[in-house]
Image: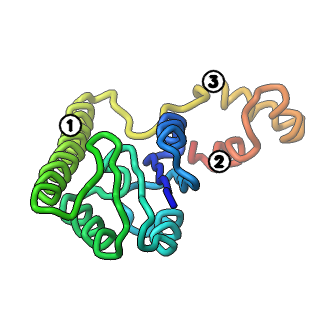
Amino acid sequence: MKYGYARVSTAHQDLGSQLQALEKEGCTKVYSEKFTGTNADRPQFVKLLSILKEGDTLVVTKLDRFARTALSGTELIKDLLKKGVKVHVLNMGLVEDTPTGRLILNVMSSFAEFERDMIVERTQEGKANARRDPNFKEGRPRKYGKKQIEHALHLLKSHSYKRVEEVTGISKSTLIRAKKGSV
């Protein structure tokens, strides 16, 4: 049986292109999840690994979809090959249990790990540069300004939370935090 696995790292990313590629490849069953690759305990992936048996094929769009380090990817694929499971990485081909196949796997795994490390490094550099700006504030920008919050708190003196929320659009939980002074 041909199984597919698709993964994105964050909830706001889209699995669509991976799912289409796996469907086009003829996968009978596709497991997918929105889970960081650095976490080894990915529920759908663990479930998929537990059902793979000799003669099955595991299809992924890219090597980094199921392993973040060269070592973990290589070990995982070696284990699957020992079980008689074929591994097909769409952007590099079928991984074979031959000296050449293992070489290609090691090189590709190393590149995937390098690419991820470079992304992390660039992200950290960007954050460090941003922190040098005295006006920089970590985290998501505030949705409501000081005047809007003050207006809503003033309305609370004569109206219910529900009514103030309807008028201002500011949620009850935000208003409660503002009253406590943590907004």
**On screen, 112 above or below 102?**
above
Which residue shows up at 53% across the image and 53% down it? 33
Q: Which mark is residue 160?
A: none
Q: Position of residue 153 (x, y in %)?
A: 74, 35
> Dots 2 and 1: beta carbons under 8 Å?
no
Q: Which mark is residue 147?
A: 3
Q: Position of residue 145 (x, y in %)?
A: 58, 26
Asked whether, in this view, residue 43 is left or right of residue 144, the answer is left
Asked whether, in this view, residue 21 is left or right of residue 128, the answer is right
Q: Amino acid at mark 1?
A: Arg
Q: Label 2: state its secondary structure.
A: helix
Q: Label 1: state its secondary structure.
A: helix
* Residue 39 or residue 62, whichever sits in front: 62
First in sequence, mark 3 or 2: give its number. Answer: 3
Mark 1, residue position = 122
Mark 2, residue position = 177
First in sequence, mark 3 or 1: give its number. Answer: 1
Q: Is residue 12 visible?
A: no
